[in-house]
Image (spheres, rainbow, N blue to C red):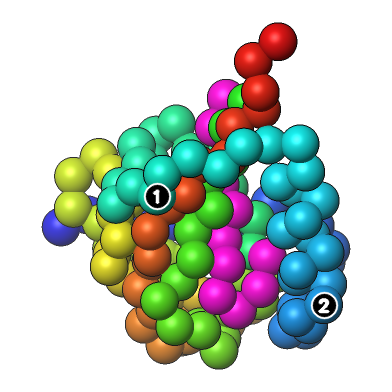
Amino acid sequence: MRTFILLPLLAACTSLPVDTSSADRALAEATAGRIAGAPQRCIDRSSAGGPQIVGDHTLLFTQSGRRLWINTLPASCPSLRRDSTLIVQAFGSQMCQNDQFQPRQPGDVVPGANCRLGTFTPYDRPKR
């Protein structure tokens, strides 16, 4: 098992929870003009940038500018905030469904509760 740290893409510098309407709006903006693909269990973590924390149950990862990965957590993660750093416990070179992570807030010594990753849905820009 390897533990690695994912630093968030900061959309706004706040430690307040993301309200549902702004999370829905941010997700709609990020996926506008993109086509959803079949959900996948794992993605290569070395090519995944992010995450952008969209809400207490949604993470957005970028891959080479053309593809976004939306990870919908199986349950909400109450300590997940926009400025959280994620401490992920992963096996191998991929992030996979059910890998556990702990959100940590800037300045906190103790991370938040364990949360689990969900499936990764790709969103691609149409080919021209």
Does 59 lie within the magenta span?
Answer: yes
Determine the CA span between mark 2 and mark 1.
24 Å
Q: Earlier in the sequence, mark 2 or mark 1?
A: 2
Q: Residue at x 44, y 31 (%)?
A: 47
Decide: marks 2, 1 in contact (CB < 8 A)? Answer: no
Residue 10, position in %: x, y? 75, 56
Q: Residue 116: tell me if it is visible.
A: yes
Residue 52 placed where, x, y %?
A: 65, 56
Rendered residue at 78%/82% (across/down) = 19
Give the number of the disc on residue 21. Answer: 2
Q: Secondary structure at mark 2?
A: helix
Q: Secondary structure at mark 1?
A: loop
Instruction: Please name whichever residue, 111 or 50, is drawn nearer the observer in this view of the structure.
Output: 50
67 lies above or below 38: above
Pointer 1 residue? 39
Q: Quadrant of residue 46?
A: top left
User: Where on the picture, by quarter, is residue 55?
Assistant: bottom right
Asked if residue 77 is positioned above or below residue 103 in the image, the reply reads below
Q: Nearer the viewer, residue 112 or 97?
A: 97
Range of magenta residues = 54-64
Residue plotted at (56% across, 86% down):
79
Residue 65 seen in the current view: no
> Residue 64 location in percent, x, y?
57, 25
Quadrant housing the N terminus: bottom left
**Residue 58 colored magenta?**
yes
Residue at figure coordinates x 18%, y 53% from the top left: 91
Neighbour class for label 2 at 10 Å: few (<14), some, many (≥20)?
Answer: few
The three-letter amino acid code for the residue at tag 1 is: Pro
**Quadrant including the C terminus:** top right
